Amino acid sequence: MADNPGAQPTPSPVPAPEGRLDSWKEIAAYLGRGIRTVQRWEREEGLPVHRLAHEKRGSIYARREELAAWWESRRLTLAAPPTPDVPGVSDASVAPLLERVTWTTALTSWPALSSDARLIAYVSDGGQDGTTPQIWIQQIGGAALRLTNGEREYSHLSFSPEDTRIVFTASDDSGPNVYEVPTLGGEPRLLQRGASRGRISPDGLWLASVPHDAVGIRVAARGGAGFRTVAPQMVDVACATWLPDSRSVLVHARPDPAVEPDWWIVPTDGGSPTNTGVVQQFREAGLFTVPTGVAWVDDSLVFTAAGSQGVSLYRQRLVASTFQPTGAPERLTAGSESTWLPTAAAGRLAFFSSRADANLWSVAVDAASGIAHGPLRRMTRGPFPLGYLTVTNDARTLAYFTFRLGDGDIFLRDLGTGSERALAVAAPGTKGYPVISPSGRLLAYGVRMPGGGRALRPIVIVSLSDGPAPSGVEGAWRKLGEDCGGRPREWVDERRLIMERFGRLNSIALIDTETGDQQELLESPERSISNPRLSPDRGWIAFEASRRGEPASVFVAPFREQPIPEAEWVVVVRSASHPFWSADGRFLYYTPTGTNPLVRSAVRARRFSAEGLVDGQSIAVYASTEMLMPAYLPGTAPVATPDQIILVLGDFRGDIWLMELT
C-alpha cells in the first residue's frame, strides 16, 4: 500500500479465518494508519474491534468487512444533504454523487484534475509517515505512479490544457520555483524562478505565476521565457487560476496593504481588476475563507471556508457580466470531515477530505529538561476550528477562541477542574483573538466590524469581576476607540497590551488600555512580523518574521517599551514558526517547518537565560506522525504551563474524493 497511494485495501492472498485481522498491527496495516491511531479510533470513534473471550489480555481481532463498513460510515456525512442552519447560506438539496480516489489515508494535498477528469495528480507521503511527500499521478480507479523523488516541498499542482504536462511549485532553501514534468514521467523542467502557483492558460499560450514576494501576477509565454507583471498593485496574492477565456486570472489578494483581501478578476492585458466581493459576503454570513485553493466552475467559485459547521467546501455563483455574487453561498460538503483544496474539470470536483477535527490536546512536560513525555490527552471535542490560546500567570485559566456555539465565541477553561464556559459579555461585531491578563482579572479581544475596504478593528476589554475561573461572572466591557488597527496578542501587565498591527507587512506595537496610546515595538521594511510572545519575566520578546516568499524564522529581542531595531534581533532558528515560552522562561519552544507547509508535526526548543540564548543544540521536545498542528489556520501557536504543553492538533491525514457537480 505504501508504494501505491491510489490502491484500495485488498485481502491478503491467504486470508485469516473468516477474513479476520488478528492483531493491532494487521488492523493498522489494513487501514493504512499507525497502531496508536486505530487504538484511538476504537476507543473514541467506535472502530469495530473484538476481544477474544478467555484469552490473554490484549488478544483482539477485527473483520475486514466490518472495518470497511465503518470506514465508509465515517465518509457518508460528506454526501448527506446538510441541514441549513447558517443565515445567508444555502445547502445542496440533493446529495452529490461521490467517488473515493485514494485509499491510503495519507498526508495528501494539492490535487489537480486533467481536462477530462480521468487523471488526477496530487502530493502525498503515500502513507509512509516521516517521509517527504512526492507528486503522484493516477487514472481514476487505477494505480498510482510516483513522478518525483526530491527532498523538496511540492505544491500547487495543475495540468496543462492538453494534459501532457503537470505544472507544480517546488520550494527549498533558495525559495519557490515553478516546474513542469511529463504526465507519464520524466525529468522536471524549470519554467520560472522565484515564483509559485504556476498555471498554463486554457488556450495553451501563457503561463501565469505568482512572484515570490506575492506582489502582482507574472504572465509569460508558455515555456516561461520572459515575463511581464500585471496588476502590480495587488499584494498578498495567495491563489491564482485562469478564467476559461484565457484573458483573465482569478486571484485572492488585496489591492492595497490597508484593504481587506478578496477574490479579484485580473485582466492580463493590463485592465483594471474587479473585486468580486465574495469574501465580504462570506464574512457577513459568519464564514472565514481559507485561501489555499480555488476552482472556477461555470461562472462560480468553489473554495474552502471555516465556520460553525467546520471546514467545508462552498460555491458562490457570480453574475457573468459583472463578476458580482448572485444568490447565497452554497455549502457543498458537511459533517465532521474537513474538505479543502478543490480542483475542477469536466463537471467534476476533486478535493482532499480528512477527519480534521482540530481540538485542544495536552502533553505532560518535564520542567527540568523541557521535554514532553507520556500520551496526549484530549481536552475538547468537535470539528470546529479553534485557536488563539492564552493562559494566566498562575496557569489556572486558559482562554481560547472557537466556533463551537455557532458564530465564534471565547471560552474560559479552568485547567484544574476541566470545566469551562463561554464569555457572556460581548460587544457588537465578530469577536476573536482573546488574551487573558496575567492575573486573570481582565480579558481583551479583537472585533472586526462589518464593511468593505478597510475594516475597523476596535479592541474590547472585559472585566472578569469574580475572577477568571469558569464560575466567575463578567463585569463591564469597553472599547479602545473605534479602530485600533490591529488585534491583541499578549498582556505585558494589567494595563498594557502587545498587539499585532493589521497590514501586509505586519508590525508589533504596544497599546495602553487606559489611554489608547500606541507605541511601535517591532517593524521592518522587508519582513512581515507575527506571533509575538513575551518571556515570563518580560525581559525578552520572541516572534516570527519572514521576507516575502521565504519561510519564517524565529527571532528574539530584548523587550522594552520603545522601538526595537533589527540590529538587536537574534535569530533562534530558521524555517520555524509559532514560538512560545516554558512557564519558567528557561526554554523557548517553536515548531519547525516541514515539507508540508500546511501542518506542523514537532516541537523543539532552545535553552534560554536572563542574558539570552544558551549555547547548545536545539532540543527535541515533542513529535507526532499522527496528530498534527494545522498551521494553515491562524492562531495555532501552543502554550505551556509548568506541567504541560497545550496544543491545537488534528488528524489531518485523509484521501482524495470526486464529486459530480450539478
Image (spheres, rainbow, N blue to C red):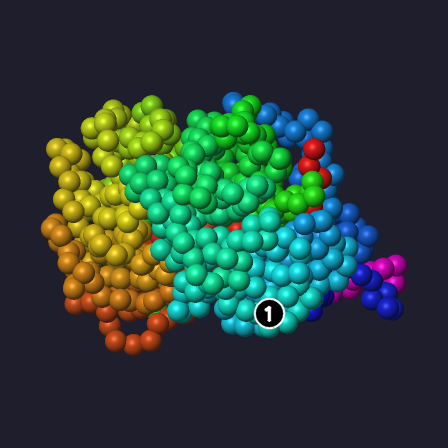
Query: Looking at the image, which is closer to me, 454 or 334?
Result: 454
| Picture layout, residue 386 above or below residue 319 | below
Residue 76, percent from left and from top: 71, 40
> Taken as a whole, is the magenta stretch helix, strand or loop?
helix
Query: Looking at the image, which is closer to me, 594 or 323?
Result: 323
Left or right? Give the position of 164 relative to 505.
right
Residue 457, percent from left and from top: 28, 33
Quarter of the image for residue 373 reads bottom left
Query: Looking at the image, which is closer to me, 598 or 210?
Result: 210
Q: Residue furthest toward the bottom?
A: 616
Identified by mark 1, the residue type is Thr
Report the magenta residues as a range. Answer: 17-27
- Magenta segment: does it hold 587? no
Left or right? Give the position of 346 relative to 641.
right
User: To which residue does mark 1 refer?
Assistant: 148
| Picture layout, residue 99 above or below residue 466 | below
Question: Looking at the image, which residue is at 67% across and 55% down?
Answer: 162
Query: Looking at the image, which is closer to me, 212 or 415?
Result: 212
Let me know if residue 338 appears in the view.
Answer: no
Position of the N terminus, as image quadrant, is bottom right
Residue 271, percent from left and from top: 41, 39
**Disc 1 element:** loop
Let me know if residue 228 appears in the view.
Answer: yes
